[in-house]
Image (cartoon, helix red, strand yellow):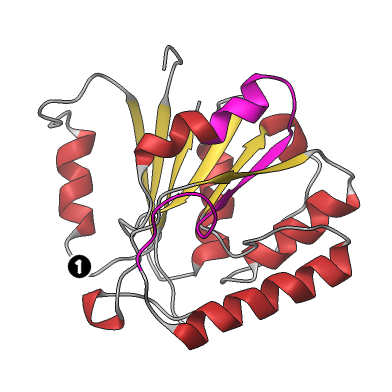
């Protein structure tokens, strides 16, 4: 993409081999991949998604920060589309949209209904017309994030950041993304559980 890239990975005390993989990456064992700055930060106890994001933001140094859940449901090939509204000067914040315009795996009705309910409730309270408030792809100008005091420990990060960017009157765009959802048997987390997000600052 012609951008200097920095990757910050927060290991939220994972027990699935993540630590060992990250140690190899941190030592430069990235076969077939170009050079990239990599920072690995480990929580000594599981703190939750919101806490992991706050830790990531403390270590990211880029002018644009892209937040990605590290669960393989999201495709990094969409980075250029997510960054475009910010790079073109049209947006301060970009939300991915899992359900409009791109292929997505068909899965759980009640999960989808719950997501739509939470997005609708968020839109009522924020006066936005988002389609996918809970999406795991969100991109921010650093200057916008520096105006926000994040407090959520768990999945409350999603509505919290949405309300706070709306309150600030920031320019928000949505971009269709590919979504490869998992079943619970494949490791899908429910909102009551946590997973470690991955951050890339550009």
Instruction: Indicate yes or no whether the magenta region holds residue 91.
Output: yes
Residue at 70% across, 66% down: 159
- 109 left or right of 16 in image: right
Q: In this picture, is 179 found above or below 106?
A: above
> From this viewpoint, which residue is outermost toward the top?
2
Query: With 157 as the anchor, is 31 left or right in this view?
Result: left
Based on the picture, tell me whether residue 178 belongs to the magenta stretch: no
Q: Taking 89 as reference, is 186 left or right?
A: left
For image coordinates 58% across by 26% down, the residue present is 84
- Residue 133: image location, x then y, percent: 65, 62
Range covered by the magenta-colored residues: 82-105
The spot of residue 196 in percent (x, y) is 40, 60
Q: Quadrant of residue 39?
A: top left
- Indicate the quadrant where residue 161 lies: bottom right
Picture quarter containing residue 173? top right
Taking the view exactly as shown, the residue that stands out farthest to the bottom is 110
* 172 relative to 87, above or below: below
Q: Residue furthest front?
A: 101
| Secondary element at tag 1 | loop
> Residue 128 at x, y = what percent?
82, 57
Q: Nearer the viewer, residue 135 or 41?
A: 135
Q: To which residue does mark 1 refer? A: 16
The residue under the point 63% across, 21% down is 87
* 91 or 197, nearer to the observer: 91
Q: How many residues crowd around disc 1 within 10 Å: few (fewer than 14), some, or many (20 or more)?
A: few
Of the pair 34 and 115, the residue shown nearer to us: 115
Quadrant for the N terminus, please.
top left
Residue ID at (44%, 16%):
4
Vertical position of residue 53 compared to residue 34: above or below: below
Picture coordinates of residue 156 (x, y %)? Answer: 64, 71
Count of number-bearing discs: 1
């Amino acid at each position: 993409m012609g951008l200097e890239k920095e990757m910050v990975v927060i290991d939220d005390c994972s027990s699935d081999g993540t630590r060992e993989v990250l140690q190899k990456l941190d030592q430069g064992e990235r076969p077939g991949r170009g050079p990239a700055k990599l920072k690995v930060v480990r929580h000594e106890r599981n703190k939750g998604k919101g806490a992991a994001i706050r830790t990531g933001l403390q270590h990211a140094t880029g002018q644009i920060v892209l937040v990605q859940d590290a669960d393989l449901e999201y495709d990094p090939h969409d980075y250029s589309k997510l960054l475009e509204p910010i790079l073109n000067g049209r947006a301060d914040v970009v939300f991915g949209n899992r359900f409009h315009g791109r292929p997505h795996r068909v899965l759980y009705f009640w999960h989808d209904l719950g997501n739509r309910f939470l997005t609708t409730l968020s839109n009522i309270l924020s006066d936005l017309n988002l389609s996918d408030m809970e999406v795991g792809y969100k991109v921010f100008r650093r200057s916008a994030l520096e105006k926000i005091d994040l407090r959520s420990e768990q999945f409350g990060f999603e509505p919290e950041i949405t309300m706070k960017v709306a309150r600030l009157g920031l320019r928000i765009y949505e971009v269709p993304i590919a979504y490869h959802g998992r079943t619970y048997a494949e490791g899908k987390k429910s909102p009551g559980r946590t997973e470690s997000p991955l951050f890339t600052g550009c």
